[in-house]
Image (cartoon, rainbow, N blue to C red):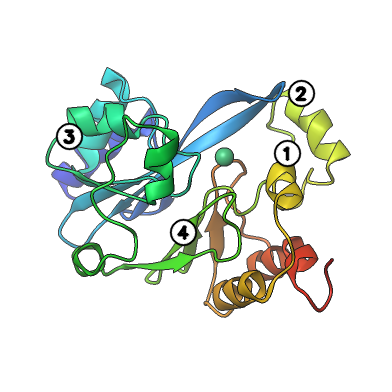
């Protein structure tokens, strides 16, 4: 291993865990939501030009910035849906050369966020060709875009799915059992309550399921590697007109 690469790993290791060596990392932080303590994850992808693509940014503490800087130069700060915008503006303030990518609906919820490019903008797509943008249509409550890192078969979503596991705080372990998402991926309850079955949703899920997915990374679950496509399709079955309601 090259010395530079080793130094990067050491500097980032306290904050980030490598999911795909030298390509994708995640960092977790606790977050309280509706009385339960979830884990929320930031995913970082290193682009071909060594720039960094930061998805659902965490607070840019000195420790986080040092870890990011060890991995590369922050090029994109991705707001993946209407809700995961909380630290986008503070992160952008530290990385003025980075572009904030996301939906305009996030700006409407948080005036501090200045979205420069949509995830479907040709300028963005040309600059980050290793990631395919796939909007989750028919779910305006989220207005989420998923991203597929084809080289590693990694589908990167946010509130597309969630699950609880033994590593979680007891509040989320308990709630996860109530909502049926302990040990298996489900659509977050609030997303499910606000989503009606439609052809648009069904088409988006089928588009995602047609990808050669090896793992799914979402904000509030461990990396999903066990039957990822099957779990994704089953979780969204309620929203397909043929079977859902
Ligand atoms: Fe979330």
Question: What distance separates the C-alpha of mark 4 from that of mark 1?
Answer: 25 Å
Q: Is label 1 in a helix, a strand or a loop?
A: loop
Q: Earlier in the sequence, mark 2 or mark 4?
A: 4
The image shows residue 139 at horizontal and vertical percentages of 60, 58
Proximity of marks 3 and 1: CB atoms separated by less than 8 Å: no
Classify 10 Å Cα crowding around label 2: few (below 14), some (14-19), many (20 and above): few
Q: CA distance from mark 2 to mark 4?
A: 29 Å
What separation in Å lies between label 4 and label 3 (alpha carbons)?
Answer: 23 Å
Point out the tag, 2 or 3, that comes first from the N-terminus.
3
Q: Earlier in the sequence, mark 4 or mark 1?
A: 4
**Real-space Cα distance between discs 2 and 3?**
35 Å
Ranked by sequence position, the earlier of labels 4 and 3 is 3
Instruction: Give how far across and how far down residue 48 sits, in percent.
Output: 20, 63
The kind of secondary structure element at disc 2 is helix
Q: Residues within 10 Å of mark 1 (few under 14, many from 20)?
A: some
Mark drawn on residue 145: 4
Residue drawn at 46 percent across, 59 percent down: 145
Query: Position of 9 compared to 57: left or right?
Result: left
- Comparing marks 2 and 3, which lies closer to the viewer? 3
Which residue is nearer to you in this view: 71 or 180?
180
Give the residue pinned by disc 2: 171
Eyeballing the image, is 242 above or below 37? Answer: below
Of the two numbered discs 4 and 3 in the rendering, the one whose residue sits closer to the viewer: 4
| Residue that badge 3 annotates | 95
- Is 115 or 167 nearer to us in this picture? 115
**For numbered disc 3, what is the local secondary structure?**
loop
Which residue is identified by label 1? 165
Dividing the picture into quadrants, the one containing residue 60 is top left
Q: Disc 1, disc 2: CB below 8 Å?
A: no
Other residues around mark 3 within 10 Å, as few (<14) / some (14–19) / many (≥20)? some
**Which label is found at residue 71?**
none
């Amino acid at each position: 291993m090259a010395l530079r690469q080793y130094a990067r790993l050491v500097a980032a290791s306290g904050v980030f865990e490598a999911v795909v060596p030298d390509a994708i990392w995640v960092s977790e932080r606790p977050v309280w939501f509706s009385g339960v303590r979830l884990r929320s994850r930031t995913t970082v992808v290193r682009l071909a030009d060594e720039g960094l693509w930061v998805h659902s940014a965490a607070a840019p503490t000195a420790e986080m910035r040092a870890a990011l800087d060890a991995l590369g130069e922050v090029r994109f700060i991705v707001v993946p849906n209407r809700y995961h915008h909380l630290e986008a503006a503070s992160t952008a303030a530290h990385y003025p050369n980075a572009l904030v990518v996301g939906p305009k609906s996030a700006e409407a919820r948080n005036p501090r966020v200045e979205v420069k490019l949509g995830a479907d903008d040709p300028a963005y797509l040309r600059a980050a060709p290793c990631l395919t943008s796939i909007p989750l249509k028919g779910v305006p409550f989220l207005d989420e875009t998923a991203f597929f890192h084809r080289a590693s078969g990694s589908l990167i979503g946010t509130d597309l799915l969630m699950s609880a596991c033994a590593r979680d705080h007891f509040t989320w372990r308990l709630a996860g059992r109530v909502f049926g998402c302990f040990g298996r991926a489900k659509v977050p309850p609030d997303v499910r309550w606000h989503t009606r079955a439609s052809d648009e949703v069904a088409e988006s899920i089928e588009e995602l399921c047609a990808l050669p997915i090896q793992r799914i990374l979402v904000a509030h679950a461990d990396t999903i590697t066990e039957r990822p496509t099957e779990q994704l399709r089953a979780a969204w079955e309620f929203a397909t007109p043929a079977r859902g309601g």
